[in-house]
Image: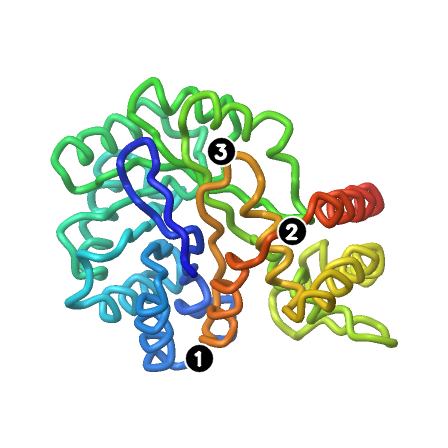
Amino acid sequence: MMEYVAMANGLKVSRITLGCWEMGGGPWEKLSDENNIRVIRDALAQGITSFDTAEGYGQGHSESVLGEALTGQRAQCVVATKVSKAHLRADDLRRSLEQSLKRLRTDFVDIYYVHWPNEEIPFEETFSALSRAHQEGLVRAIGVSNFSVRQLEEARRYAPVSVIQLEYSLLCRAIEEDMIPYCLAHGIGLMTYSSLAKGILSGRFHPEGGIPVVPTDFRRERRLFSPAHLEAERPLIDVLRKIAGRRGVQPAMVALRWLLDQPGVTSAIVGSQNMDHVQENIAALDLTLTQEERDELDKASRQALSAIG
């Protein structure tokens, strides 16, 4: 059953957020828009009310698909999108926001993120422009993505930043050292992306009794998918499979439940163009991991991270 959480700014988000990057195409193998519109609508019917996209996903195509899918149901949803790194001058940002609103078929966006920091443009210019959009009601909440603690602190000097989006999973835990404590101390929501390490934590890339097979897509170039790193990650996948086997569930569900149990995590963003996978992600909320299982996952995760550097 879906769970919901209210952030400090009053927005109530589902604990699983449907990520719509894949639906824009680009580096992903994109299924038809008709399929993806159906997935979005089915996800909403299953209780997912939080959706994440960006102007950079398929040059706005992901936003257009999401906007069409949510027509007539917008009021039930929390829609988040992002302005690209190249569009952080005040005039560019305003233009990007207006174009995103048009593609999304909405008068406002619930969360508007700065997708990546750009140190070449003064933070004061960018976040003052965001603050004006917030005051006008075009943006309900201001967010940042891929920022350091220092950058987040500076951004907060000029605008009420209330949520951050960062990579976090059993195979990416750097934010535990400083960012999560900072967010907890300041009431900042945390949305996680690559919540399943781009699919590695599903076990799909570690076939039993053979050499891992990497698909012929952009992930082939990512370091976590190198043959040496895939082999170093295998013991963690084995632990996920063992726990999942005892529970009669999928490894990805165990990995998601671990993530959602971590302090400070508001919602896990998980992308999919397959409704069966979306339903599995939702079902992860019905799991309860024992302390022994959490300890086992923590140990295997840290060993894998130590091995891959």
Residue bearing mark 3:
147
Give the amino acid at mark 3.
Phe
Dot placed on the residue nearer the N-terminal end, 3 or 2: 3
* Residue 188 horizontal side relative to residue 132, left or right: right
Q: Position of residue 74 (x, y in %)?
A: 19, 60
Q: Relative to 52, is 88 above or below?
A: above
**Residues at circles 3 and 1 in contact by the CB criterion of under 8 Å:** no
Which quadrant would the C terminus be assigned to in this image?
top right
Q: CA distance from mark 1 to mark 2?
A: 34 Å
Which quadrant would the N terminus be assigned to in this image?
bottom left
Which residue is painted at 47% across and 63% down in the image? 282
Using the image, tell me which numbered label, if any, was put on residue 289.
Answer: 2
Q: Secondary structure at mark 1?
A: loop
Dot placed on the residue nearer the N-terminal end, 3 or 1: 1
Which residue is painted at 72% across and 54% down in the image? 223
Nearest to the observer: residue 13 or residue 130: 13
Q: CA distance from mark 3 to mark 1?
A: 31 Å
* Residue 291 horizontal side relative to residue 25, left or right: right
Give the amino acid at mark 2.
Leu
Q: Quadrant of residue 229?
A: bottom right
Nearest to the observer: residue 86 or residue 307: 307
**Residues at circles 3 and 2 in contact by the CB criterion of under 8 Å:** no
Which residue is painted at 39% across and 81% down in the image? 32
* Structural crowding at the residue carrying mark 2, measured as other residues with C-alpha within 10 Å and reported as few (<14), some (14–19) or many (≥20): some
Q: Please state which of the two labelled residues, at mark 3 or mark 2, is closer to the viewer.
A: 2
* Structural crowding at the residue carrying mark 1, measured as other residues with C-alpha within 10 Å and reported as few (<14), some (14–19) or many (≥20): some
Using the image, tell me which numbered label, if any, was put on residue 274.
Answer: none
Dot placed on the residue nearer the N-terminal end, 1 or 2: 1
Using the image, tell me which numbered label, if any, was put on residue 31.
Answer: 1
Q: Secondary structure at mark 2?
A: loop
* Structural crowding at the residue carrying mark 3, measured as other residues with C-alpha within 10 Å and reported as few (<14), some (14–19) or many (≥20): some
* Residue 23 horizontal side relative to residue 130, left or right: right
